[in-house]
Image (tube, helix red, strand yellow):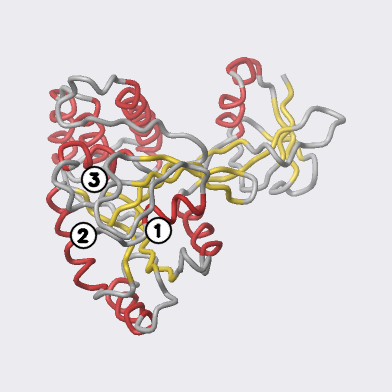
Amino acid sequence: MPANLPPQYHEAEKIYRSAKTPEEKVEALEAMLAIMPKHKGTDHLRAELRRRIAKHQEEAQRRPSAGKKGSSYNIRREGAGQIALVGLPNAGKSQLVSTLTEAAIEVADYPFTTKVPTPGMMEFENIKIQLVDMPPLTDREAKPWLSHLLRNADVLLVMIDLGEDPLMQMGAILSELNGMKVKLVGLEAKDELLIGVALKKALIAGNKNDLSNAVENYRRLESSYGDRLPVVSISVQKGMGLEGMKRTIYNMLDIIRVYTKSPGAKADLSEPVILKTGSTVEDAAGSVHKDFLRNLKYAQIWGSGKFDGQRVSRGYVLEDGDVIEFHI
């Protein structure tokens, strides 16, 4: 089936070919992916673009920070996904990362405490997700490199102080992000022609819901943005709503957990293989070891199959919780 790519796709492709840095290449590839029509004729090309995006993102993270134009920090992605926290001063970003991870983060009641991005690993069930505490969006010293980190993150967690006017905060945050050419989208990113603009999945967390005016402010926040973005109510200080927020973050990562087993043995359910939703047996084999992918004859599935131990091919699409037994 022909791809039937529109003229805008080829324009973005020209930008990709002339791009000099990994960050510029990722921007162009994301635009190409958004423009591309979705049908069977583009499945292979869509997968290839995603592979290139991952390659250039890894390249950007490997590059030394010294002498880099426009970026002074790189945070290597670890765990099942990378979540960058964004917001205005004193919204509770540092306290959240300090509470949910073992990262050594300075928490204070004065603004601009965070000067450099600080990662920490948050546990969710049997996986870990990386949270990155970021300087406030209004920190002018951070502006040259902040956009790069936000573009590379899998999800942006927007922190709002429910003790203050939430709509004014969101307006300021969206204005800052717009200046960085970053646009927030919800659980299902929409295909849009926005060359140079990064579409980032985002979750709004209304923090400090234990304050007296928090209920009304959260209602205003959800009423204004709940139809576009997922919104949750939390109190980091009181530990309220944090588990629900973790679950929402996991859902937004668009990943599945599958488990492997040897013939005659039980699966180790404490060590899942993390894959993107829609991944196949072939993808799982390649993520475990290249020899598995090269020599794989077939696999058996426990979970989503018609029956336990069902024999499936390389192209079988996996579901969350599946157990796989490879046969080579």
Compared to 215, does 124 lie above or below?
above
Q: Going by the image, does 150 lie left or right of 97? A: left
The residue lying toward the viewer, choosing from 40 and 18, is 18
**Where in the figure is residue 245, as x and y percent of width and height?**
49, 62
> Picture coordinates of residue 63 (x, y %)?
29, 20
Quadrant assignment, res 324 = top right
Closer to the N terminus: mark 1 or mark 2? 2
Residue type highlighted by circle 3: Ala
Q: Position of residue 26 (x, y in %)?
A: 26, 33
Question: Looking at the picture, which amino acid does disc 2 mark?
Answer: Ile
Q: Residues within 10 Å of mark 3 (few under 14, many from 20)?
A: many
Q: Is residue 58 left or right of residue 325?
A: left
Q: Earlier in the sequence, mark 3 or mark 1?
A: 1
Q: Secondary structure at mark 2?
A: helix
Reply above or below: 317 against 87: above
132 or 258, nearer to the observer: 132
Tag 3–tag 1 contact (CB < 8 Å) = no
Sequence order check, earlier mark of 3 and 2: 2
Q: Which mark is residue 198?
A: 3
Task: Give the CA separation, mark 3 to mark 2.
Answer: 15 Å
How many numbered dots are placed on residues in this image?
3
- Quarter the N terminus occupies: top left
Distance CA(mark 1)–CA(mark 2): 19 Å
As shown in the figure, which amino acid type bears the numbered disc 1? Leu
> In this picture, is 229 found above or below 177?
below
| Quadrant of residue 126 within the rendered picture | top right
Nearest-to-viewer mark from 1 and 2 = 2
Q: Mark 1 sits on what residue?
A: 187
Q: Secondary structure at mark 1?
A: loop
Q: Which residue is mark 2?
A: 173
